[in-house]
Image (cartoon, rainbow, N blue to C red):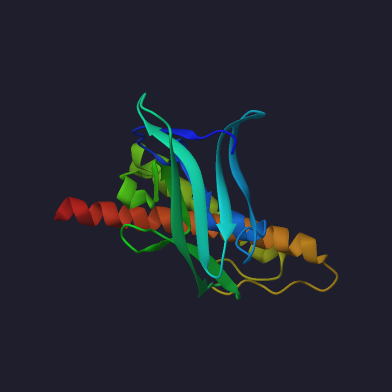
Amino acid sequence: MKGGHNRRSVGTTAEALCLDANVMRKTGALECGRSGNITWKSGDQVTSSVCFTTGNDTLTLTYRTRAGYGNWATVTEHLDVTWSACRYGGTRPYLVCPTCSRPAVKLYVMGQTRCRECHGLVYETQRVSGGQIDRRIDQLQRRADRIKVRLGGEPGMFRFPPKPKGMHKATYERLRDIAWAADCEADDIIADEAERRLASCE
């Protein structure tokens, strides 16, 4: 296995190695019987990698890690994969955090593969002002709405518009994935802000 990663303290999700269930689904990595490497790059150079094997709603990861300047150790983790209905039809994959057992779209590899909350990570948006957060949410929602309107739907509609007649399937799926990603990121930011504000009131 190439690469590996050094366990260190990070503050935001942008600084951590991320396993994204949506990306893995799109590349076919979550199909039963698949195996390979997930890599992270800096420019053209591979900086870290994880070997994976996918079973029946399971994902086995193998990678190297170390604490500080200690010896490298090989870690093997077994993750559960669950699926739920999504707003545009079909199903959406989630990776189950081994610590809290909550399903998450993204888990983060930091010596152990865990969700954002269990690793104590925050979104990059939590380091900016409330006005900037609101603008980011609005930007994401507008991006999704523009695509829905382009496909013959309406802004804010819950169910994604069907493929227009004459549009190539690949084009439709690309636009759907862009809108989906924007909606999901906006939902994640909104949920994170609600959680943060609730915690501050306790």
> In the rendered image of this protein, does residue 126 appear above or below residue 147?
above
Occupied quadrant, residue 199:
bottom left
Foreground of the two, 82 or 166: 82
> In the rendered image of this protein, does residue 164 appear above or below residue 35?
below
Residue drawn at x 62%, y 67% is: 32
Image coordinates of residue 158 in percent, x first then y, are 54, 73
Image coordinates of residue 161 in percent, x first then y, are 66, 72
Examine the rendering and report whether any part of residue 65 can be seen: yes
| Farthest-out residue, top | 69
> In the rendered image of this protein, does residue 5 appear above or below residue 104?
above
Residue drawn at x 35%, y 42% is: 126
Residue drawn at x 38%, y 58% is: 97
Examine the rendering and report whether any part of residue 146 can be seen: no
| Image quadrant in which the N terminus is located | top right
Foreground of the two, 169 or 57: 57
Occupied quadrant, residue 122:
top left
Image coordinates of residue 175 in percent, x first then y, are 69, 59
Image coordinates of residue 81 in percent, x first then y, are 49, 65
Residue drawn at x 16%, y 54% is: 201
Occupied quadrant, residue 121:
top left
Q: How many marks?
A: 0
